[in-house]
Amino acid sequence: MRALFPGSFDPVTQGHQDILRRASLLFDEVVVCVMSNANKTGRLPVAERLERLRAAAAGLSNVTVDSHTGGLLVDYCRRGGIDVVVRGVRGTSDLGYEMPMARMNHELAGIETFFIASDPALAHVSSTLVTTMDQQGRAPGGRVGRQAPDVSPVTNAFQAAAGKTQTP
């Protein structure tokens, strides 16, 4: 069964990488796809997000990376023969945001949504937090836009935000 893991991935985080790894163990194929979101302003170029997703998916032989900037998620799924959408959920606020979309995707195209609970050690991590830390000069290892595609420096920013490490 093919599954789609959509998101803006702006930037890719270790939380995204964890959900992707776990989804790859559950499905025959996972397509991780940078989707446009009219409610979000992209900070990193799509090409850079794709590069970082490829790095995050390294070693996952059943994962492909793609982007979709026009139309609905269900349109992408129909064209790709995808019946399941994978979503990571950090807490109840994520679930409250995701449920109406899951219901609409099912109503429009019969697409099921498979929720994966985030690793508790990464539950406080969000792309917005990483960007905020970077904008305040608190992202260890340099600016988010110049960090290595393996996204490991992003973890340091999360730990600093949680008060687990000291920043320079």
Image (tube, rainbow, N blue to C red):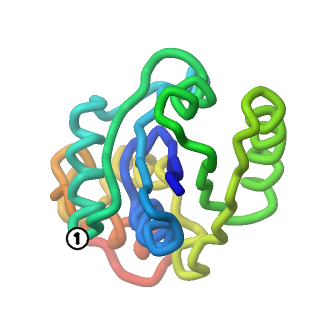
Residue 84, horizontal then vertical, whole percent: 62, 49
Residue 44, horizontal then vertical, whole percent: 31, 34
Q: Give the residue pinned by disc 1.
A: 59
Residue 152 left/right relative to 22: left
Front residue (pair 72, 143) = 72
> In this orientation, does residue 151 appear?
no
Residue 65 left/right relative to 8: left
Residue 156, horizontal then vertical, whole percent: 33, 72
Q: Residue at x 20, y 45 (%)?
A: 51
Front residue (pair 21, 51) = 21
Mark 1, other Cα within 10 Å: few <14 / some 14–19 / many ≥20: few
Q: Residue at x 30, y 31 (%)?
A: 46
The correct choice, above or below, for 162 with respect to 107 in the image is below
Residue 83, horizontal then vertical, whole percent: 62, 45
Circle 1 — which element?
loop
Name the residue at the top extreme: 70
The correct choice, above or below, for 60 with respect to 113 in the image is below
Q: Quadrant of the C terminus?
A: bottom left
Front residue (pair 78, 16) = 78
Q: Residue at x 42, y 41 (%)?
A: 33
The mark total stands at 1
Q: Residue at x 68, y 59 (%)?
A: 114
Amino acid carrying mark 1 in the image: Gly
